[in-house]
Amino acid sequence: MIYIVSPGGTREKGGMGRIVDNFTSDLARHNPEVRFEVVDTYGPDANFRRMPFHFALAMLKLCGCFLLGRAQLVHVHMAEYGSVVRKGAVVLLAALFRVPVVLHLHAGRFPEQVQKSHPALRWAITRLIGLASEIVVLGEYWRTFVMETFGEHARRVTVLHNAVPGPDRVPERTGEGPVHILFLGRLIKLKGIHVLLDALAAEDCKGRPWRLTIAGDGDLETYRAQAAALGLADRVTFTGWLDQPGCRRLLAEADVLVQPSMYEGLPMAVLEAMAHGLAIVATPVGSVPDAIEDGRSGLFVPPGDTAALANALTRVIDDAELRRTLSEGARERFMRSFDIAVYRERLLEIYRRNGWTDAAHAHAAPLKSVTERIAP
């Protein structure tokens, strides 16, 4: 049995929950021989006050399963700050029972945490890294960070890009009416929504034909107030949190996705926009440059740079041919590297080399290796 440990399980509203939901649904559909269970260490409602209760239950469950010898492997999904403490306890528990751990890093601010930590905490994080059989990261930026920061303690570091299921074909876009711009994600300052609204209110953008949909939960009232103060209230729609069908509907309707984040791992919204053939304007943070090539499958702007974002938005609003070029480039890149079927095969390879076996594949030829680097 593989235990997949993640905050919120498959119902967490952020990118980590979405990737766990994507790949577990895909595994259940295409590889029913893979026995797994998702263990929620935070609670599906993301309520901090109830989190200790959910975490204690998760630890008790895992301890019982380890005692009974049910676990072949634990796949731990970790973010930053408090997540490091909780997932560190899970990794330590697995190590005590000699259960192999695949530690999957999703945190945009994990480098910041490590750099600012007290030496004692940094030592503890290094020991945590050393207990994992394999570290899975979202892109080359993260692999370099892990190898340079933790050195020989990171025994095997593997790049596994996030992935999403996509439509069979790109929705047809007529190009008529205002250009539909979409922001998809949590409404927090680190996502750069305030920069996006300021950019659209700039003189170059404000007079052009566009409308904006902001889809996600978080601090809606703050950004509604900002949009109103900037004179954009009648052009900006706030949907609140949407389920997967709701997100896919918006992705099919929109022309441009904007991801103006200050920090990221590899945002699911960018991959979903690539799958649906949107023109993308994004910041080159985290592993976003692994997915987007500037000028071919999207446009990059520096994080926090209102003028640069306004200029990029003006370009895609004015130029339908540019939108078409970026759309085609994004869809082609998605099909080659970020479809969920590619992810599934690479993930199964990681599971196999860390202790999971199944009768159907026990004597199969090995799959083509994932891009990886093993510390000396």
Image (tube, grey):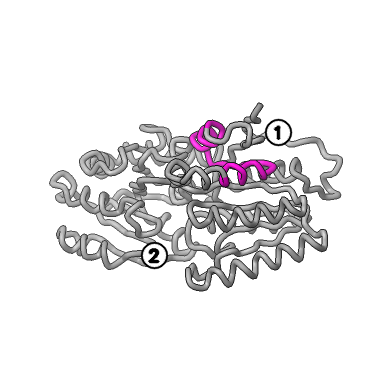
Judging by the rendered image, the residue that carries numbered circle 1 is: 368
Verify whether residue 129 appears in magenta: yes
Q: Which residues are magenta?
A: 124-148
Q: Amino acid at mark 2?
A: Asp
10 Å crowding of disc 2: few (<14), some (14-19), many (20+): some
Q: Earlier in the sequence, mark 2 or mark 1?
A: 2
Q: Amino acid at mark 1?
A: Lys
Depth order, front residue of 252/51: 51
Percent of width and height locating residue 123 = 56, 43
**On screen, residue 188 above or below 45:** above
- Asked if residue 242 lies left or right of residue 27, the reply is left
**On screen, residue 128 above or below 369:** below
Task: Give the residue drawn at x 44%, y 60%.
Answer: 247
Q: Is residue 259 visible?
A: yes
- Disc 1 is placed on an element classified as loop
Depth order, front residue of 96/142: 96
Q: Is residue 266 visible?
A: no
Percent of width and height locating residue 316 = 28, 41
